[in-house]
Amino acid sequence: MPHFVVDYSANLHDRLDFQTLFKELHTYVVSTGAFPIGGARSRAIRCDDYYVADGREEFAYINLTLKIGAGRPFELREEVAKKVFEIFTDWMKPITDNTYVMISFEMSELEPVLKFNMNNIHPLFKD
């Protein structure tokens, strides 16, 4: 963990540089000391079928979800959520300055007994 998942309306596709966003998000969360780099992953999912507000073709949306493992203090989660949203909205600013866009973000904490994973990348980042 953490996992960043972006879903967005297809009418934004040619205007988004996800690698820049993902690099900044990974750099930030790892800098907090609460998230290991070996578990960080990001992905973007283009939605070709969507309907925003009254259906105008120029209306767009983008949603970012941050999934984290359980156990971090609320204060840290709140601080991280605020900073991640700031990074996200700053990255979107060139688009929101010229386009009608709904932007949303949520952080979810996964239940430890309901989350399963296997990761052989973590050992590459051990000191």
Image (cartoon, grey):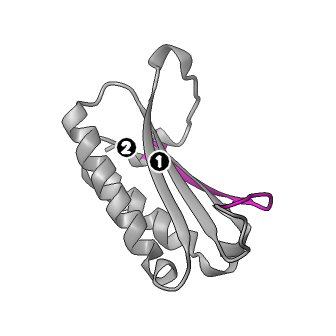
Q: Callout 1: 10 Å neighbours few (<14), some, many (20+)?
A: some
Apparent side of residue 33 relative to residue 3 in the rendered image (left or right): left
Where is residue 125 shown, x and y percent of the image? 40, 47
Report the residue marked by disc 2: 36
Please indicate, yes or no, whether residue 11 appears anywhere in the rendered image.
yes
Report the residue marked by disc 1: 40
The kind of residue tagged 2 is Pro
Asked if 66 appears above or below 17 in the picture, the reply is: above
Q: Is residue 71 magenta?
A: no
Apparent side of residue 13 relative to residue 73 in the rendered image (left or right): right
Q: Callout 2: 10 Å neighbours few (<14), some, many (20+)?
A: some
Asked if 38 appears above or below 74 in the picture, the reply is: below
Dot 1: element: loop
What whole-number distance in Å separates the C-alpha atoms at marks 1 and 2? 7 Å
Q: Nearer the viewer, residue 118 or 5?
A: 5
Residue at 79% across / 62% down in the picture? 48
Where is residue 92 shown, x and y percent of the image? 47, 73
Q: Is residue 43 magenta?
A: yes
Q: Nearer the viewer, residue 126 or 52?
A: 52
Where is residue 50 shown, x and y percent of the image? 74, 58
Where is residue 83 shown, x and y percent of the image? 29, 57
Residue at 60% across / 63% down in the picture? 61
Asked if 96 appears above or below 41 in the picture, the reply is: below
- Segment colored magenta: 38-52
Quadrant that contains the C terminus: top left
The kind of residue tagged 1 is Ala
Q: Quadrant of residue 109?
A: top left
Dot 2: element: loop
Apparent side of residue 84 relative to residue 114 in the rendered image (left or right): left
